[in-house]
Amino acid sequence: MDSSFPVRKIIHVDMDAFYASVEQHDYPELKGKAIAVGGGHRGVVSAASYEARKFGVRSGMPSKTAREKCPHLIFVPPRFARYKEISRKIREIFYEYTDLVEPLSLDEAYLDVTENKKGIESANQIAREIRQKIFEQTGLTASAGIAINKFLAKVASDINKPNGQKTIHPDKMESFLEELPIEKFYGVGKVTANKMFTLGIFKGKDLKKKTIEDLTRLFGKSGSYYYNVVRGIHHSEVKPHRIQKSVAVERTFFEDLSDEQQIEEKLSSLSEELHQRLQKNNILGRSLTLKIKYKDFSLYTRSNTKEEYFTSPEEFFKTSKKLWELRPFDKAVRLLGLSLSHLNTEEKKQVSVQLKIPFQEFE
C-alpha cells in the first residue's frame, strides 16, 4: 500500500432496489411480488424488485424482454418526486455524521468518515447506525461497504446485499482482491469481463500477473486503472460537490445490427433510458451525441446542440435518428450510445475543498 497517501475511512451506502422498494413500501399489496418500475410498451426497466431479479429482470432491460423472462411481472410507473423526497431524508442522515458526502445518484453515495461529527472511531459502527436510521425513518433497507478507498468500498457494498455490510480491512485487502471474480470489479463491464475471460483473467490474482504495458496495450487508457485497483491503489477523494458534465447510455449487441428497424428500436429504447436517468437526477442538457461502434471496431460520433434543453424521450429519439442518417458508413453496428452534455449542472458549479485527513486506526 502506498504510504505517501492518507489512509481514509470510506463508506459506500447503496439502497437496496431503491425505486422498487419504495413502491413495495408505499403499496403493501406489492410486497413479495415481482415488480418493475418503468417499462411501458417500448420502454425500459428503471428498477426491478429482488423477486423479479430472480427471473433475470434487470434495470436497463427492454420491457418486452423483461415480460418474456417473468410473465407475471407487474409494471409500476415511476414516481420520481417521491424517490427524491426519500433521497433527501437519507442524505440528511449522512450529514449527521460528515459533510464529506459524494452522491452518485438518488440511491447511493460515498461518505468519508475518517473524521466525523460524532467522533466515532469505528467506520463499521457508523455504517450500522446509518443503515438503522434509514430503516427507522423510511422503512427501507440499505447496504454498505467500508474500506480505505472508494473503489474498494463500492465493491464491498455489493457483497452482502440486500440489507448487509462488508468491511475490507487494510490487512485483508490484498488477499480479498486476489480472490475477487473479475466481473465483480467496479469498472469492469460485461464486454470487458468477456475479453478478460478469453485472456485467462478470471480473478484478481490473474489480473495482477499482467504488466501495466500488457494492460494498456489490451485495454487502452483503462489499463492503468485495472493495474492499480487490483493492487488496492485508488486515490480519488470523496468530492462533496461533484459536477456532472455528461450523462450517457449505451448498448453492445451480441449480434451486429444492420437492419434499419432494429436500429430504430434500439435508439428508441436508449432515448427512453437516457430520459429516465436524467429525470432520476433532475438533469437537463442541450447537446446530444450519438456514438456508433461498427463491426470492425471503428468508432463514429456526431452531435447536435440546441439553444433550449431537451425535455422528452421523443426529442432524443427524433434527434438521434437524424444523427444516425448523417453517418458516413453503411456497416454492421456492434454498439450504439447516446450521451447528453451542456448540462444544467454546469450552471450550479460550487467550489469544494477536500480535507486532508491524518491517519487514524481503521477500526
Image: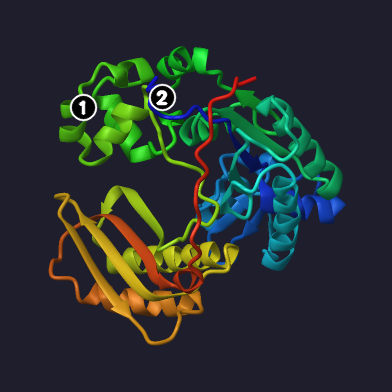
Colour mapping: rainbow
Instruction: Return the residue nearer the eye: 277 or 210.
Output: 210
The quarter of the displayed image where residue 115 is located: top right
On residue 232, which mark appears? Answer: 2
Q: Of 191 and 101, which appears nearest the observer?
A: 101
Please give left or right for residue 295 compared with residue 77 in the image.
Answer: left
Against 146, is 339 above or below? Answer: below
Q: Which SS class for mark 1?
A: helix
Badge 2 local density, few (<14 within 10 Å), some, or many (20+)? many
Neighbours of disc 1 within 10 Å: few (<14), some (14-19), many (20+): some
> Is the residue 354 above or below the residue 338 in the image?
above
User: Measured from the top left, where is residue 242 in percent x and y?
Assistant: 49, 56
Amino acid at dot 1: Ile
Q: Quadrant of residue 123?
A: top right
Q: Residue at x 23, y 55 (%)?
A: 293
Which residue is found at the position 45% from the left and 12% from the top? 175
Residue at screen point 27% across, 19% down: 200
Residue at mark 1 to residue at mark 2: CA–CA distance: 15 Å
Query: The C terminus is located in which quarter?
Result: top right
Residue type beneath disc 2: Gly
Q: Position of residue 310 (x, y in %)?
A: 45, 79
Measured along the vertical axis of the image, is residue 105 above or below residue 7?
below
Q: Report the side of 150 relative to 228 (left or right).
A: right
Q: Secondary structure at mark 2?
A: loop
Disc number for residue 363: none
On screen, residue 10 above or below 284: above
The answer to which image quadrant residue 12 occupies is top right
- The quadrant of the image that shows the N terminus is top left
Identity of the residue drawn at 40% across and 66% down: 265
Image position, residue 248 (x, y; %):
40, 60
Q: Which residue is mark 1?
A: 212
